[in-house]
Image: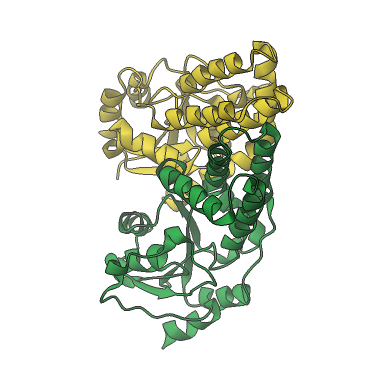
Chain colours: A green, B yellow
Amino acid sequence: MLPVLGVDADDTLWENEERFHEVEQRFRDLMAPWSDGEATDAALLATERANIARHGYGIKGFALSMVLTAVEISDGTIDARSLAGIIGWGHEMLAHPIELLDGVPEALDTLGSTHRLLLITKGDLGDQLGKIERSGLADRFWRTEVVPEKDPGTYRDVLECHDIHPAEFTMVGNSVKSDVLPVLAIGGRAIHVPHTTTWVFEEPDPEELAGVDFPVVENLGQVAGLLAG
Amino acid sequence: MLPVLGVDADDTLWENEERFHEVEQRFRDLMAPWSDGEATDAALLATERANIARHGYGIKGFALSMVLTAVEISDGTIDARSLAGIIGWGHEMLAHPIELLDGVPEALDTLGSTHRLLLITKGDLGDQLGKIERSGLADRFWRTEVVPEKDPGTYRDVLECHDIHPAEFTMVGNSVKSDVLPVLAIGGRAIHVPHTTTWVFEEPDPEELAGVDFPVVENLGQVAGLLAG
């Protein structure tokens, strides 16, 4: 049996954060009568932070947080149609075509010849599974796991369920906080493939980074060479 | 190794639909200036039906559908604070204490002595896992699967992932559409434990019921006797 390589999805296989940034710009524009861009960003982030535990990650929670923030910023004076429009942005995001990052299908083909590929992604279940389906990459994966949070406990559960020893497991992804540190914490290996930007909620605690060492590659295509070396 | 018994969660282990009915009543009251109760119900159901594929099942999608319906019914004249209040109802639902159905912990103890119990539930990932945690029943289950939809393909995937042959699998739940028919379709057994009410989206297609036979019990406590018989 081939060893198992865990692979993250959003911003590792395809663009994701960019979709949020586009809608955040629309939200700034909508709020402009009441608030400048910086204050709008800060208010939305505060709402998201207050709600992440109950909303989880994903577009539906983002839409709910934007509606709540718009009501607050406008002190209840924003018109109802604008709030429905915000939900419409969420629907657009849910249907957005998948933009694969450069070289991803080829890189997965190569990695799949030496590893069983286990997709591990966090977020809304239906949304994540829909993206995997629309990406055209589903067949390249041995199995898929959508988890609510990527912490050591979650990785331990996923590996146990698939009979994988952490010491024989490597994870690849763009988030040090979600794809690297928790895997190292349970005794696995991890390879960081940075994306252009990092969501503030994905910024690792600097204290957790102290003394931790892991390989960083520029893109998914460089992972096979690292694993072989 | 003990055989595997699949167990549904919402309205099989604990009250769920009741929570939605309570909020639907509040929604009728909020819409009363524009619409009578029956028309409000019909409009909300139409919005939910139009959005179920992108929202999936769960409270966040329900809240988004209520906001959209309120804007439509009021022709955009409802005030923004009322729409934020609807989202607040969703937050209340997400935090609502779990009300176990009568005899459930004892029934699971009995069933767990002869079967490995596999919880299979559909809906929002975080919300469903949170309910399992808050129910105090998590330890009684061998494994837990949250799926976006309960159709034959999903059951086939879940059983394959856990190395279970459909012929050796039995599912127990309150929904004929979600817990019984798809399991029979893949060659498993299923036991129906009806709840007091059935959500309209869970009503089975009468054509699919033709010629199909399955045992029905009054509560989860009666399942063990049926399995032993």
Q: Is residue B196 left or right of residue B207?
A: left
Q: Is residue A32 left or right of residue B100?
A: right
For the point 51% across and 76% down, which residue is it? A111
**Residue A110 at x, y = what percent?**
55, 79
Of residues B172 and A67, the one nearer the viewer is A67
Of residues A212 and B33, the one nearer the viewer is B33
Q: Is residue B4 visible in the rendered structure shown here?
A: no
Of residues A10 and A45, the one nearer the viewer is A45
For the point 32% across and 42% down, which residue is it? B142
A47, above or below A11, in the image: above
**Residue B14 at x, y = what percent?**
39, 24
Of residues A41 and A18, the one nearer the viewer is A41
Q: Is residue B144 left or right of residue B89?
A: left
Asked which quadrant contains residue A1, the reply is bottom left
B30, above or below A184, in the image: above
Q: Is residue A161 visible in the rendered structure shown here?
A: yes
Q: Is residue A11 left or right of residue B217?
A: right
**Residue A54 at x, y = what percent?**
42, 40
For the point 49% across and 52% down, which residue is it? A42
Give the quarter of the figure containing the C terminus of chain B: top left
Asked which quadrant contains residue A68, the reply is top right
Give the quarter of the figure containing the N terminus of chain B: top left
**Residue A166 at x, y = what percent?**
31, 66
Single out the residue that lies furthest toward the right.
B75
Single out the residue that lies furthest toward the bottom.
A229
Numbered disc total: 0
A119, above or below B143, in the image: below
For the point 47% across and 47% down, which residue is it? A48
